[in-house]
Amino acid sequence: VSDPSPHDLEALLRQFQASDARELHVRTATLELFLSKDPAAPAPWGGGGGAASPTSTAAPPSLSSGAERQSEMAAPAAAAETFPEHWTILRAPYLGTFYRAPKPGEPNFVEIGEPVAAGRDLCLVEVMKLFTAVCAESAGTIRAILADDGQMVEEGQPLFAIEPAGA
Amino acid sequence: MALRRVFVANRGEIALRIVHAAQKLGIETVVGVSDADRGSAAAQLADRSVVLGPGPAAKSYLDPELVVHAARETGCDGLHPGYGFLSEREILPRLCAANGIAFVGPDADTIVALGDKLQARAMARAAGVPLVPGSDQIASAANAAKVAEEIAYPVLLKASAGGGGRGMVIAHSRAEVEAGFAKASAEAESAFGDGTLFMERFVPRARHVEVQLMGDGTGKVLHFGERDCSVQRRYQKLVEEAPSAAMPAHLCAQLHEAAVALASSVKYRGAATAEFLFDVEREEIYFIEVNARIQVEHPVSEQVTGADLVGWQLRIAGGETLDIEQADIAVSGHAIECRINAEDWQRGFVPTPGTITRWSAPDGDGIRLDTHMAEGSAIPPYYDSMVGKLIVTGADRADAIGRLTAALDAFEVEGVATTIGLHRAIVAHPDFRANTIHTRWLEQVLLPALES
């Protein structure tokens, strides 16, 4: 079996998610991949300490676009410095109050794990009842939301960690 | 109710000055900074600092909604605007009032009334304050020529909404006044969005004198003596002193009385400065305007009266009334302040933003330095170039000049050009020592002499 391209792997992930299968284990000459719908499932190559995120040790970073579970576990207030260097940190353009939804009671603009296109509105920053949307600068997947809904954010404060598409 | 937590809506040395004054009164401080001022001295000393926006002032310090939002969200019950920036913009007290925050300054209507020079002139006239012979609104160039004949040349055309010398033209003849009308009107329109002009007699040899006022909003207004700020370049003050050593005592008394009457007539609340021209030849004083804020040069008044003027501002904003009387305020000694700017004064006063690599400041008896700078401090390119104010106090003017000379000689700054050298030249000049200078002395006498 020749090495799968990232494209192949993404297709594989989608099929796995849509299927009834609970686990999938693939091994090639250079890559070993283990997917499970049970977050507590141990990887077939043994403990190794990475038990809290079963998919993270198996899948190279470019593959995690399909693996929402892993990011959902990330603490919302995690420091920006802990993210991989190629991820984008979207910051507050100025001081204001951070809102995740267009209006109270409406669904949030975006959730963790969601792929977003460039220009997509991600949140509102409010200054004296003037609500301004902050949008994604480029396409990617939301990996972390770093500010709390309804809280004041300062200029330059990290709001979202975004993994660029096709990296 | 006394203020509990004050928001400092300014930067530089005045932000630091406000934090010091608040701390002395046990008031917590939150400083709103721009991205360029994250590490500023005021931000470090305050209980908290919040980053408002990017470096350019329009997107941080000059955005009233942003500033008041930050004050409210950080739980402040007071807001001090400092000087410059939003300090005399009526929207700031209005927004503060709408958000339950006490504005450290007068109410919006007072700011509006005093900010319009024609309205301020009318108020001054009503309060019996002497005005420079002049006109109300000038309607046309022909009208301007007619008014100029009545006042007698030379005359000064001024923008009603103006300040800082913009929209201002001196005319010595009918031809000049007609040409000047169009020029000043266009300049005022573009600078202030209002081309309305009025005219005053031009006083060739004038000194700038002003009175420090404090009102508590009940109609009670006290003065903290006068200042003389006649060393100016392009209407910007460089050296200020208190008291005035050039004015006869009877004129000084008239000056104080007029200033208090004017502020009292509007039940002024907070700190204000009433500015006057002192016509040296005619021995007369004329009202110019009232500035509804604490001024850069307030320390010289503090030095000779012992008052903490910024402290008084905070107390009055917290609802206190003036519990002292005029007789309790005595002026003793003489104080002189030099505004030190990061400018290359030998190359057209071009600002020199950058990093200070060496900062060796004078210290000792009678020396006060109000600054936010130290070795390693950055001067961002977005704001005014003032890096500090050197204030020296002596027993009398000669004593103060002696100490100032030594202090300026000892003051060494490297990394950026500063105006310290210019101040040395001013203070050493016989005209300054003899106190025969006037508002155009620096530009007409000293600078040309230094160039040749």
Image (cartoon, coloured by chain):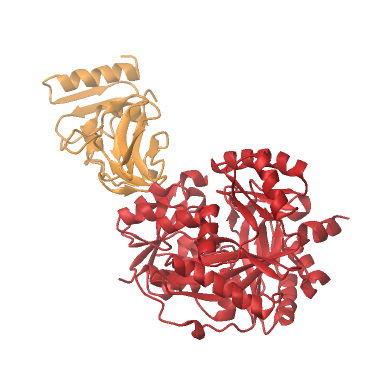
Chain colours: A orange, B red
Q: Is residue A59 above or below residue A151?
A: above
Dividing the picture into quadrants, the one containing residue B388 is bottom right
Which residue is at a point 23% across and 28% down the rendered structure image?
A34
Q: Does residue B424 appear anywhere in the picture?
A: yes
Q: Position of residue A29 (x, y in %)?
A: 33, 21
Q: Position of residue B282 (x, y in %)?
A: 74, 68
Which residue is at a point 26% across and 17% down the rendered structure image?
A11
| Quadrant (top left/top right/bottom left/bottom right) for the N terminus of chain B | bottom left
Q: Is residue B379 above or below residue B318?
A: above
Q: Is residue B91 left or right of residue B399?
A: left
Q: Is residue B359 left or right of residue A40?
A: right
Q: Nearer the viewer, residue B302 or A108?
A: B302
Q: Nearer the viewer, residue B228 or B256?
A: B256
Q: Does residue B363 appear anywhere in the picture?
A: no
Q: Is residue A122 left or right of residue B371?
A: left
Q: Position of residue B169 (x, y in %)?
A: 70, 47
- Residue furthest right in the image: B452
Dividing the picture into quadrants, the one containing residue B134 is bottom right
Q: Is residue A142 above or below residue A27?
A: below
Q: Is residue B360 left or right of residue A9?
A: right
Which residue is at a point 66% across and 70% down the rendered structure image?
B228
Q: Nearer the viewer, residue B278 or B14?
A: B278
Q: Position of residue B20 (x, y in %)?
A: 47, 70
Q: Nearer the viewer, residue B449 or A27?
A: B449
| Quadrant (top left/top right/bottom left/bottom right) for the C terminus of chain B | bottom right
